[in-house]
Image (tube, rainbow, N blue to C red):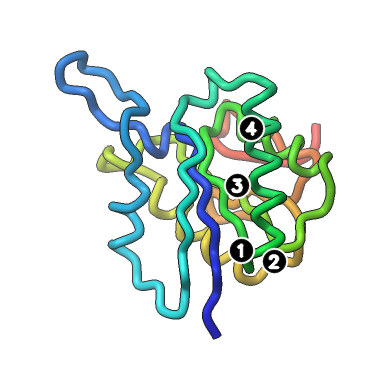
């Protein structure tokens, strides 16, 4: 049976690329297609939805609403949704998605603390964990990163630990 996955990209650290003229890492192009070709994905149909490509620190309330609306709408016609998102404001988008109603299928947010282009990135691990999680979870809104899956509401970024946690 073929699994229909929607992969919504919004930018964030996972997609930052090195800009040699300025010496900066910026959201200029998407790297997700480069990541996907490295994976063996039998029986998976991936629908790419390039929604935006911004650093989540630059996101405003309207961006979180747009991401949530797109994820929830898309969940009505696919088997699962992954939202690739910047980690600094990922929890806000996840909470907005959760507050807007139960999706038809799992909606899994993921990202990276270090860009895909770096040698010691967590990007590929987090993307593959999200791809597995979206296939086995019940409908709901989640984050999958760093060998764990957390369900919204109540997910937050723990800056000191460099990962996501639930609770106070």
100 shown above or below 62: below
72 shown above or below 12: below
Residue that numbered label 1 is attached to: 134
Q: Residues within 10 Å of mark 3 (few under 14, many from 20)?
A: many
Q: Residues within 10 Å of mark 1 (few under 14, many from 20)?
A: many
Measure the alpha-carbon separation of dots 2 and 3. 13 Å
Q: Is residue 72 left or right of residue 11?
A: right
Does residue 29 show up? yes
Residue at 41% in and 39% down = 14
* Residue 137: image tag: 2
Mark positioned earlier in the residue sequence (2 or 4): 2
* Residue 109: image tag: 3
78 shown above or below 159: below
Q: Position of residue 41 (x, y in %)?
A: 40, 72
Q: Quadrant of the N terminus?
A: bottom right
Residue that numbered label 4 is attached to: 157
Measure the alpha-carbon separation of dots 4 and 3. 13 Å
Q: Secondary structure at mark 3?
A: strand
Q: Position of residue 126 (x, y in %)?
A: 48, 51
* Residue 154: image tag: none
Q: Secondary structure at mark 1?
A: helix
Mark positioned earlier in the residue sequence (2 or 3): 3
Does residue 150 show up? no
The front one of 35 and 100 is: 100
Measure the alpha-carbon separation of dots 2 and 1. 6 Å
Q: Position of residue 54 (x, y in %)?
A: 46, 27
Q: Position of residue 89 (x, y in %)?
A: 61, 28
* Of the two numbered discs 4 and 1 in the rendering, the one whose residue sits closer to the viewer: 1
Measure the alpha-carbon separation of dots 3 and 1. 10 Å
């Amino acid at each position: 049976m073929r699994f229909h996955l929607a992969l919504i990209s919004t930018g964030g650290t996972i997609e930052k690329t090195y800009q040699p003229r300025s010496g900066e890492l910026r959201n200029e192009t998407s790297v997700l297609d480069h990541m996907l070709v490295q994976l063996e994905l039998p029986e998976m149909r991936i629908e790419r939805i390039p929604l935006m490509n911004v650093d989540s620190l630059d996101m405003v309330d309207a961006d979180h609403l747009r991401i949530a609306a797109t994820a929830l709408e898309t969940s009505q016609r696919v088997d699962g949704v992954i939202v690739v998102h910047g980690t600094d404001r990922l929890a806000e988008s996840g909470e907005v998605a959760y507050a807007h109603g139960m999706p038809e299928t799992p909606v899994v947010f993921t990202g990276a603390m270090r860009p895909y282009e770096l040698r010691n990135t967590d990007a590929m691990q987090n993307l593959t964990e999200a791809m597995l999680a979206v296939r086995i979870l019940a409908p709901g809104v989640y984050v999958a990163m760093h060998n764990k899956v957390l369900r919204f509401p109540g997910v937050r970024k723990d800056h000191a630990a460099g990962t996501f946690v639930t609770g106070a």
